[in-house]
Amino acid sequence: MARFDIERFVDDQRIGPVQLTVLLVCGLVCFIDGFDIFMVGKIAPAIAESYGQPPEAMTELFVFQQVGLAIGAFTVSPLADRFGRRFMLMACCAIFGVITLLSTQAETLLHLSILRGLAGIFMAAGLPMALALISETTPKRKRSTFVALALAGYSSGSAASGAVAAWLLDSYGWQSGFWIGGLVPLLCVPLLMFVVPESLKFRAERNPKDPTLAATIRRMDPRVSLSGDEFFALGQEQDKAQKAKLSDVFTNGRGLMTMIIWSACLLSMTSIALMAAWLPTFFQEMANIPIQRFAVSAMIAYLGGVTGTLTIGYLMDKFDATKMIPIFYIGLACTMIAISLIPFESAIFMPVLILWSFLQTGGQAGLNTFITQIYPPRMRSTALGWAGGAGRVGGVLAPIYGGIAIGNNFTLQLTLGLAAIVPFVVAVLVFLLGRTQQVKDYQGAKAALA
């Protein structure tokens, strides 16, 4: 039986229609993920007002959403390592889209909060599954860049969500954001079904004799000669099918590395969740800046997030990730303090807000990209999902802090000054991550390929 190395085949490929199609469709999934998560925070005061509630009452909705995201990250994301990235992406997009559309009919804030929690279960799985599929379709030399491009879609969704608050809110109400957030994932379902192939690496690890692999290989490269009697292996060491186990992320010396990654993601996503949920409300309640005005600034600023994502992807193809990522998080802590001190009307406020978005989004993109590189394919979606799940646990706590800050009349400077401690700790953790043996092994392999 002839041995066919899937890993080598993918790495030897030129960028072509298959890789670009996977990038575009998975990038759309990332776009709507970013749109939906950040959209709610931008229109939170309007939602509360429509139900006759004060702004701090939105804490309930944010907590429900984050709990749903945490549950989904821990329970739904690993299913992609069992049933396939494409199948689970289709299921999640379909269910999430329907629940989001139903949210437009919520009669009470509690009802809306419950629906957001349910939607979050399936929303949480979209990003890790999409990144896993992209990383397993793209040659190693371009992998970080392609993952970064998909994450730029996430940042673009975040920026686009500002349009709801800036231009659609007054005319069409807060429901307009939920209509967009529900229809786009439903559009992704037929695209995933008909134009995106399942991961070769996932199928080869599950069944090295899978007859469907040959058709996908010929689609990617018609010049490949196959006899029909191949053993499709992932690397030189695989000699049998390997099924994913949830414990894989802790085996073979990965335990310490995984715990540090979880801690870094927990704190990083705590910071992101806090700013996404409460920053417009902080400026409205603590600095008397209407959400429509702040939304325009935030929409422009999130373009910095797209640039940050692409920049970190490029840098990680060139330099040591565990030294580059901490630089982003130290800078993030500094900019959080700066935007609390600089007057909103100042000419320098917008450049600093753009830099904040550049560093926040770029730092998290760096973490996500790094995870796709240091875990093997059979556990990649689980690793991404569980790291995200750890982050969502922090996201549950972040809205509570925002509600306390508003309820106790904290100043903007005190609120963001305390919040800036979090990204600084992330920088320390990622620097320590570079000292673990598994990461050293990855860096050695990367240097050998350079």
Image (cartoon, helix red, strand yellow):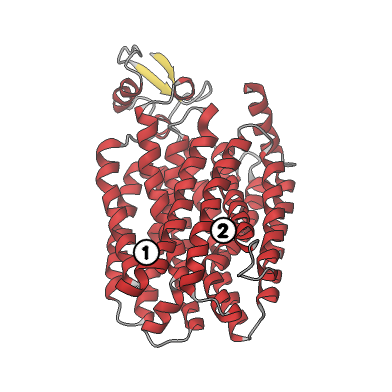
Mark 2 or mark 1: which comes first in sequence? 1
The secondary structure type at the circle numbered 2 is helix
Q: Is residue 240 visible?
A: yes
Give the position of the C terminus as an image quadrant.
Answer: top right
Residue at the spot x=29%, y=72% of the render? 104
**Amino acid type of the residue tagged 2 in the rendering:** Ala
Residue linked to disc 1:
119
**Amino acid type of the residue tagged 1 in the rendering:** Ala
Q: Is residue 203 visible?
A: no
Which x, y percent locates residue 48?
42, 81
**Residue 402 quadrant:** bottom right
Q: Pick out the residue farthest to the bottom.
A: 52
Check the image and report above or below for 145 versus 182.
above
Separation of marks 2 and 1 at Cα, in angstroms: 18 Å
Which x, y percent locates residue 74?
48, 57
Q: Which mark is residue 390?
A: 2
Which one is in front, 438 or 411?
Answer: 411
Residues at badges 2 and 1 in contact (C-beta under 8 Å)?
no
Which one is in front, 46 or 244?
Answer: 46
Residue at the spot x=71%, y=52% of the render? 427
Check the image and report above or below for 226 versus 381.
above
Residue at the spot x=56%, y=70% of the render? 279
43 sits to left or right of 282: left
Which x, y percent locates residue 84?
36, 41
395 sits to left or right of 84: right
Foreground disc of the pair 2, 1 = 1
Check the image and report above or below for 418 versus 438.
below
**Residue 414 quadrant:** bottom right
Which one is in front, 106 or 281?
Answer: 281
8 sits to left or right of 345: left
Circle 2 residues within 10 Å: few <14, some 14–19, many ≥20: many
Check the image and report above or below for 149 versus 353.
above
